[in-house]
Image (spheres, grey):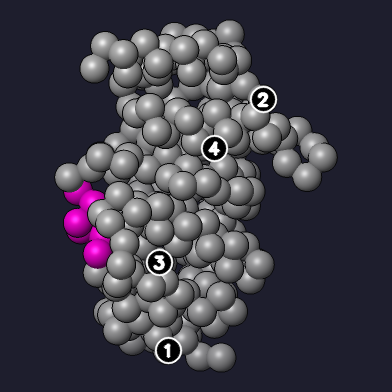
């Protein structure tokens, strides 16, 4: 154990931390295991990560950090999403993986499932981005790490609708925002052939007055056995949240609108 801790320290010593991010080194030490740090270092060695910044979010399944990055010959701010390899909560994700024809899950270990989950989110983001859905642009992934567009300014992440709460009405035209979110859900379904499957105010970010759908690891193809029930749940969550602002919408009408070609 002591040897592993020393090796973790050695890997962290190789990274360049931004001045304001040095205080976050302890968090990196706490949430990143040695295997993940090696993956992280490979991405850094390839030039994708120039400097590590602060923590954006930490959770049971994944942690997200800010980084100064480099992609396609230009410097870009990045969000670095890292799925925990050792997580007791990952069993909850099985239903979103099994039934996805893109992956053969018959002969892989539990740890490899996390790598598949990471690839799944990356590919979902790619499909959505190519269909002009407002999502963070995915850059690259390796094992349990995804590098993607950072939604925010000056290293401060953009707020979710849940973060804004009742203040949302003071920031944007809520009715227009609702309509734009529904349009994105429609493009996701019709053009990307995906259902988000976990859409709520917690997974919609307001960036430059535009809604962005995030956390798409659980998103499924529209031919998934539970795609219809997931879509209904997503739309019910939208109706519930926006009803607080006086917006009324019919679930049947929304389903019909989203799914029509």
The x, y position of residue 232, in whole percent, is 30, 77
Q: Earlier in the sequence, mark 3 or mark 4?
A: 4
Tell me how many marks there are: 4
Q: Residue furthest right?
A: 73
The x, y position of residue 109, in whole percent, is 28, 57
Q: Quadrant of residue 60?
A: top left
| Residue to which mark 2 is pinned | 50
| Residue to which mark 4 is pinned | 79
Give neighbour class at mark 4: few <14, some 14-19, many 20+ (Cα, 10 Å).
Answer: many
Q: Is residue 160 visible?
A: no
Q: In the rendered structure, are the residues bearing label 3 and label 4 in contact, judged by CB atoms less than 8 Å apart? A: no
Q: In the rendered structure, are the residues bearing label 2 and label 3 in contact, judged by CB atoms less than 8 Å apart? A: no
Q: Earlier in the sequence, mark 4 or mark 2?
A: 2
Q: Which mark is residue 83?
A: none
| Residue to which mark 1 is pinned | 256
Give neighbour class at mark 2: few <14, some 14-19, many 20+ (Cα, 10 Å).
Answer: many
Question: In this view of the protein, which residue sits in the foreground, 233 or 163?
Answer: 233
Q: Is residue 117 visible?
A: yes
Separation of residues labelled 4 and 1 (CA atoms): 35 Å
Q: Nearer the viewer, mark 1 or mark 2?
A: 2
Q: In the rendered structure, are the residues bearing label 1 and label 2 in contact, judged by CB atoms less than 8 Å apart? A: no
> From which residue to which does the magenta span run?
89-94
| Residue to which mark 3 is pinned | 219
Find numbered disc 3 in the image and state the secondary structure of the residue it sits on: loop
Q: Is residue 92 magenta?
A: yes
Separation of residues labelled 4 and 2 (CA atoms): 13 Å
Give neighbour class at mark 3: few <14, some 14-19, many 20+ (Cα, 10 Å).
Answer: many
Of the 4 image quadrants, the one containing the C terminus is: bottom right
The x, y position of residue 213, in whole percent, is 49, 57
Q: Earlier in the sequence, mark 2 or mark 3?
A: 2
- Left or right, 29 with respect to 11, comes to left
Of the 4 image quadrants, the one containing the N terminus is: top left
């Amino acid at each position: 154990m002591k040897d592993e801790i020393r090796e973790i320290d050695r890997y962290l010593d190789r990274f360049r931390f931004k001045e304001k991010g040095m205080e976050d080194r302890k968090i990196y030490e706490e949430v990143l295991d040695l295997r993940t740090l090696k993956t992280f270092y490979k991405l850094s060695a390839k030039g994708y990560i120039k400097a590590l910044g602060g923590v954006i979010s930490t959770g049971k399944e994944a942690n997200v950090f800010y980084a100064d990055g480099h992609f396609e010959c230009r410097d870009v701010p990045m969000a670095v999403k890292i799925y925990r390899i050792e997580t007791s909560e990952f069993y909850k994700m099985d239903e979103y993986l099994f039934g996805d024809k893109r992956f053969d899950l018959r002969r892989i270990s539990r740890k490899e499932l996390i790598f598949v989950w990471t690839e799944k989110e990356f590919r979902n983001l790619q499909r959505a981005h190519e269909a002009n859905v407002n999502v963070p642009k995915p850059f690259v992934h390796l094992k349990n790490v995804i590098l993607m567009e950072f939604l925010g300014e000056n290293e401060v992440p953009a707020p979710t609708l849940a973060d804004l709460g009742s203040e949302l009405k003071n920031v944007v035209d809520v009715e227009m925002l609702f309509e734009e979110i529904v349009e994105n859900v429609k493009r996701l379904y019709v053009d990307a052939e995906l259902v988000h499957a976990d859409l709520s105010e917690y997974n919609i970010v307001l960036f430059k007055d535009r809604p962005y759908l995030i956390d798409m690891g659980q998103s499924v193809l529209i031919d998934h056995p539970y795609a219809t029930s997931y879509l209904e749940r997503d739309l019910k969550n939208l109706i519930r949240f926006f009803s607080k602002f006086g917006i009324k919408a019919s679930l049947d009408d929304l389903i019909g609108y989203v799914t029509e070609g």
